[in-house]
Every structure is written in structure tokens, then in C-alpha cells.
Amino acid sequence: MKKQKTRVLIVDDDREIGSILYDFLSKSYDCVAVNSAADALAALASASFDLIMSDINMPQMSGLEMIPHIVSLAPESVVVMISGQRMIESAIEAMRAGAFDYITKPFELAQVDVVVRRALDHRQRLERFRSRAPHRDEMEQRLRHALDNHDFVVHYQPQVEIQSRKVTGAEALVRWADPERGLLLPNDFIPLAEETGLIVPIGISVLQTACAQARHWHDMGMTDFGVAVNVSPKQLQEDDFLHTLAQILYGTGLRPESLEIEVTETSLMQNPEAGIQTLTTLREMGVKIAIDDFGTGYSSLGYLKRLPIDSVKLDASFVKDATSDPDDAALVMAIITLAHNLRLRVIAEGIETEDQLAFLRLLRCDRGQGYFFGRPAMSDEMIFAYSNTHYEPEVGCANKPIVKNKSTAGNLAQAA
């Protein structure tokens, strides 16, 4: 049986923009374009759509006013709003009302592609959990049991200074060591954890483990080794988040400047002023801040200069094709230039080849991570990566780290 093509509904009273989006997206998806909210609601009443892209500022009924009707008619659809720069506050309000994300005009089609794929990936994850609805309570109990039994473990992916090729830190990544199903990746349990609120205690556990491990590395002489930890929107919005983090730093003895908190732009947009205040306090504590998946959100350029941050993480989707796609290359160059002009460091994610690394070195990107340097691994592997490994990619050489001894090579091989 042939798989049904993903369906996208485009709603924009500007026929030119609607046509541009239709021509671009119809190459990959089954698209329908309409010019008003009334026509959109009529389309939703007669057919199902996986994704709805709607302009905010439309006559008769705005995109924001249309959201409650979408929730009623198409609860399984994912909504992405299209906003002018002057309508950003309305776009944020739309996200609070149920929209998944938004983009601002003028937009680049490469960025549209990223947002659309991310929205559809989000829908697929929700669909998987809905299909498991009869087992949802069981899954929630498993999560709670895993917390009680300390079944969540932290792996670390090395972060490398691109110009010097030195391993200077690692990102902490949570895994679920389920006794029955083995090691589960975040996509297998984070959506349910967020839905149930269990992401908060899981996140605290990861912070505690990562900070304690970083202090242990420092005690071993790796005094300049930093650790980055992703913090979920729910964690960031907790009233006692700052107090909890301060307690963790005090209890582990980790210097605040050795910790980098990663937050997504989308999480900040849910409550921008409160988010900025929280980040400001973190900076005052000495903790470093990085914006994760930078370049995939359309408020980036408008809000970046307001954010009290140290770094931006260049999304892996741009790095992937930067050496073959001129549009992605231009975006990577623009983001690095913009960040450096604002005195921010850039961390490139998803580096897998020596060509990608060479391109990023040419653009003076600051740090990088990805399978080229190493897969996420247990904490002991970071000691070998830090002490015995440097990365020297040259044209024509094997895409592997250079190591000083055989025992180190064995440990790195296990990590990969």
C-alpha cells in the first residue's frame, strides 16, 4: 500500500507569498493554498492536513483568531504562523494558544524547510505517543520507576576548539538505561516526560550528574574542561530553578563559569521577558548561556541582541549541507559573522566530515561537535579524549582522530 503524502495547508492573503511557499513546499508535500481564514476553515472541514502554515495579519479573521477553530477542527495538525516583524508579539501569543512555531517575513526558503521539517517531526512524535495511548499510563509509571531507580544515565559528546583542535568540554546527553529495552535515546521518552512534567526531575538529575562529573574532571587536572547541559522550557519556567541550580553548584563545588546552560529559542519565546530575566540572573551567577539550534527560529535576528548569552549553537541541519548547498553555506556564513559582530562564540553541531570542518575553520567558527570528533560516550572516554587526542584533518587523510597510543585508540573506538 502506497504511503499517503504529507499534506500541508498554506493560508496567506498575500498571493505572492502563498505562491512562493506553495511552489517550494509542493516539491515534497501535497499542498493546498488558500487566501483567507474562511477558506482555510472550509478546507479543514473537508480534508485533513498534517501541517498548517498561516499568516497572522489577515482581514476578517486573523491567524491568531483562527487557532481555536484549528484546534477544534484539526487537533492533530501542527501549526506554524507566518509573521511580519511588527507582529512578533502576536506570533508569541499564537504559540501560547497552540501554534508550534512561527517564521518572520522576509524569509529564506532554506529556513522554511528547517522549520517545516522540525514541525512535522514534532507531529510524528506526538502521533507515536497517541498510538500508544492505551499504554501511556504504563509508560508514565516506567518513567517514574526509572527516576526512583536512577536508570537515567548521562553520556558526553566532546566539544572541540576548531582552530586549535583541542577538546575543551563536552555536552551532557541523557539516556534511559531501561532494564527490558536497553539504552533509549531522548526521542523515545522526552516527549512523554515533557507532557507529564517529569522532565523537571529528570533535568535536575542530569544537571546534578553533569556538574558532579565536571568537578571530578577538574580534580583530575582537567581544570579548563567545561560541561554543557540542555535545559527544557518547563525547567526554565520553574520558580525554584535558579535556587536549585545554585544548590547543585554549591554542593558539587563546580565553578559556575565551567557550566554552560543550553536553551532553545522556542523555549524563550513562550515567555520572552521572564526568560530574559532568568538568563540575566544565570549570567550574574557566572553561568554561561548558549542558544541551541540557532538559525531555525525566525525571531533570532530580532531578539539576539537582547539576550544575555555567550554562545549560539549552529543547527546541524545547516552544517550538513553547507559544503554542497550555496544557500546553507550563505546562512552559516551569515550566522557566524552576525554572532562574532555581537561578540558571541559559535558552536557548530553535527560535524561529520573533514570537508565540513575545513569549511567551518575557514569561517573562524569557534567550537564544534559531532561524530567526526566522537559519539556520545561514558564519562571515562572524555579523559582519554582530553589527555591523548587531537584532531588534525588534512586533505585525503582518514576521517578519524589521531591518537598517541594504542590503549587510547581502543577506548575511542569503544566510544564510537
Image (cartoon, rainbow, N blue to C red):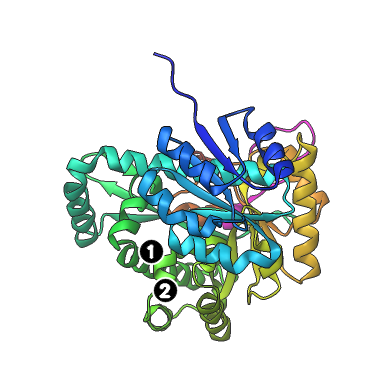
- Judge whether residue 373 can be spotted in this image: no
Residue drawn at x 65%, y 48% is: 13
Q: CA distance from mark 2 to mark 1?
A: 17 Å
The amino acid marked with disc number 1 is: Val
Q: Residue beneath label 2, please?
A: 237
How many neighbours does mark 1 have within 10 angstroms: few (below 14), some (14-19), or many (20 or more)?
many
Q: Residue beneath label 1, please?
A: 206
Look at the image and give the residue range highlighted in magenta: 386-400
Residue drawn at x 70%, y 47% is: 14
The amino acid marked with disc number 2 is: Gln
Furthest residue toward front: 60
Kindly indicate the quadrant of the structure image that contains residue 63. bottom right
- Judge whether residue 80 can be spotted in this image: yes
Label 2 element class: helix
Q: Earlier in the sequence, mark 2 or mark 1?
A: 1
Q: Position of residue 187 (x, y in %)?
A: 40, 45
* Magenta segment includes 388: yes
**Left-right relation of 201 to 288:** left
Q: Position of residue 276 (x, y in %)?
A: 56, 77
Label 1 element class: helix
